[in-house]
Image (cartoon, grey):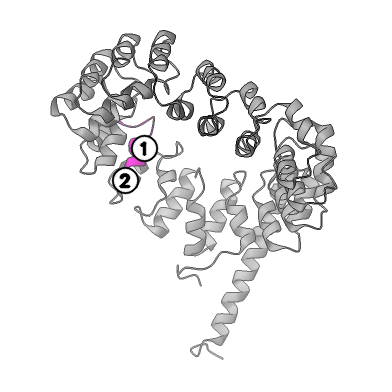
């Protein structure tokens, strides 16, 4: 009998519980048969159907829930109402961020005792104009901070926030893609450098605002790390090409385009070259140039790049460095024929990466779920390509083991009748 105590979950079942393709009906079988370890693992799923949620609530209690689950769009209304009253502020904050939420529940969360919950609620685009207007009158800092990033912020409310004495509120407002152009121009002359710099992180800011802020001489390294406009980064790269302190944060900036990264990949500074290659956003010509590198780390960056053409990946099939082959095995653009070869690799990490790759052919995922290494098998169990029949076999084998273990415990009990 299962008494609900914590039980360690075997790796294969844990992998299956993380599989997004696991049928809800089979998940409910596992929840019904499992103990606290299984229930906790089930809560980590990004989405849970309403019946599975109800089963977990009955076993763990209404308040025991992962914040990710609280934010899931799969929750029924009654469940949202329960979670909105959770004693855990991180759960209430997750509920407050839900794009579809009852207005009464959202109003309650905007008046919560916890600052983060009120901030989350005020940032919800479902917040009505009336609620925003009332929040301005109250002047609650946490609510104003949340409102400043609200994507549905009315212009009249944005005007009031732009006049706030709080630098943090004005800076958050400056990053808001819904910021009206007239207010962006006003904030471009803000006395705070932080506010002006924040405008460079706003992809919707007018070009004249971006030019004005860029030309006023803000610290180059800050611009390199913050700006989301490729033309700003291109211009800055040209102006500060010899300054690695500027190029390094620029390479890590997701807005840095492929052309600039390709140039950085051949920079005379080793750190800059490595930073560019590690983004996995350099072009095919750069990858071609580095494919024959004597440095295994460099080859691994080429092998895991989604832009690496198949003919280059082919040369890494028998690479002497296991982590280079593993890098190729984790590449979702790796051709199935190469993945098939890598699935039989002697290196455990290579097979592990193949097992998790959604591009691995079904027959090889099935083979890897029976791999002699438990970590490889568990990784294959997470793969959405795993056939449902194999999922049933995993659950059946688990049920047999747990029932056998339960009988062994009962037979060893001194109270067992003979």
Residue named by callout 2: 82
- Tell me if residue 1 comes above or below residue 308 in the rendering: below
- What SS does tag 2 mark? helix
> Is residue 102 inside the magenta stretch?
yes
The percent position of residue 35, horizontal first and vertical second, equals 49, 65
Q: Is residue 98 left or right of residue 355?
A: left
Nearer the observer, 229 or 64:
229
Nearer the observer, 148 or 299:
299
Nearer the observer, 397 or 294:
294
- Tell me if residue 178 comes above or below residue 286 in the rendering: above
- What SS does tag 1 mark? helix
Q: Which mark is residue 50?
A: none
The percent position of residue 225, horizontal first and vertical second, equals 47, 30
Please say whether residue 176 is visible from this viewpoint: no
Name which residue lies at 64% across and 70% down.
401
Q: Is residue 43 left or right of residue 22?
A: left
Give the residues in magenta. Answer: 91-103
Name which residue lies at 56% across and 52% down.
27
Name which residue lies at 82% across and 47% down.
319
> Is residue 37 inside the magenta stretch?
no
Do tag 2 and tag 1 residues touch (Cβ < 8 Å)?
no
Determine crowd level at label 1: few under 14, some 14-19, many 20+ residues with C-alpha closer than 10 A: few
Q: Is residue 194 left or right of residue 287?
A: left
Please say whether residue 344 is visible from this viewpoint: yes
Name which residue lies at 59% across and 23% down.
257
Which numbered disc flags the more N-terminal residue, 2 or 1? 1
Q: Quadrant of residue 182?
A: top left
Residue named by callout 1: 77
Residue extending farthest left: 137
The percent position of residue 102, horizontal first and vertical second, equals 31, 31
Q: Quadrant of residue 107?
A: top left
The percent position of residue 95, horizontal first and vertical second, equals 35, 39
């Amino acid at each position: 009998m299962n008494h609900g105590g914590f039980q360690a979950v075997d790796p294969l079942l844990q992998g299956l519980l993380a599989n997004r393709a696991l049928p809800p009906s089979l998940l409910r079988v596992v929840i019904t048969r499992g103990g606290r370890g299984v229930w906790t693992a089930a809560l980590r799923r990004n989405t849970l159907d309403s019946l599975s949620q109800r089963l977990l609530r009955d076993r763990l209690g209404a308040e025991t829930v992962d914040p990710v689950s609280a934010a899931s769009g799969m929750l029924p209304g009654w469940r949202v109402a329960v979670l909105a009253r959770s004693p855990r502020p991180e759960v209430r904050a997750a509920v407050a961020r839900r794009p579809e939420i009852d207005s009464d529940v959202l109003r309650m969360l905007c008046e919560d005792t916890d600052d983060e919950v009120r901030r989350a609620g005020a940032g919800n685009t479902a917040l009505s104009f009336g609620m925003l207007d009332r929040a301005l009158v109250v002047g609650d800092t946490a609510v104003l901070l949340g409102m400043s990033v609200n994507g549905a912020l009315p212009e009249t409310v944005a005007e009031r926030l732009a006049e706030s004495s709080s630098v943090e509120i004005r800076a958050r407002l400056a990053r808001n893609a819904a910021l009206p152009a007239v207010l962006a121009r006003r904030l471009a002359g803000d006395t705070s450098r932080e506010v002006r710099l924040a405008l460079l992180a706003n992809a919707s800011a007018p070009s004249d605002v971006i030019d004005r802020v860029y030309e006023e001489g803000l610290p180059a390294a800050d611009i390199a790390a913050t700006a989301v406009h490729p033309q700003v980064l291109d211009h800055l790269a040209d102006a500060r090409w010899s300054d690695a302190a500027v190029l390094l944060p620029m390479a890590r900036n997701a807005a840095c385009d492929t052309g600039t990264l390709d140039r950085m990949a051949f920079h005379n500074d080793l750190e800059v070259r490595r930073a560019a290659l590690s983004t996995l956003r350099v072009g095919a010509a750069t990858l071609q140039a580095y494919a024959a590198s004597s440095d295994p780390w460099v080859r691994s960056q080429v092998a895991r790049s989604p832009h690496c053409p198949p003919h280059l990946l082919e040369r890494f099939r028998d690479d002497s460095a296991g982590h280079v082959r593993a890098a190729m095995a984790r590449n979702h653009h790796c051709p199935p024929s190469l993945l098939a070869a890598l699935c039989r690799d002697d290196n455990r990490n290579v097979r592990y990466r193949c097992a998790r790759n959604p591009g691995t052919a079904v027959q090889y995922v099935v083979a890897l779920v029976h791999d002699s290494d438990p970590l490889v098998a568990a990784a294959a169990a997470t793969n959405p390509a795993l056939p449902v029949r194999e999922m049933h076999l995993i659950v059946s084998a688990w049920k047999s083991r747990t029932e056998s273990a339960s009988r062994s415990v009962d037979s060893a009990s001194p109270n067992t009748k003979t």
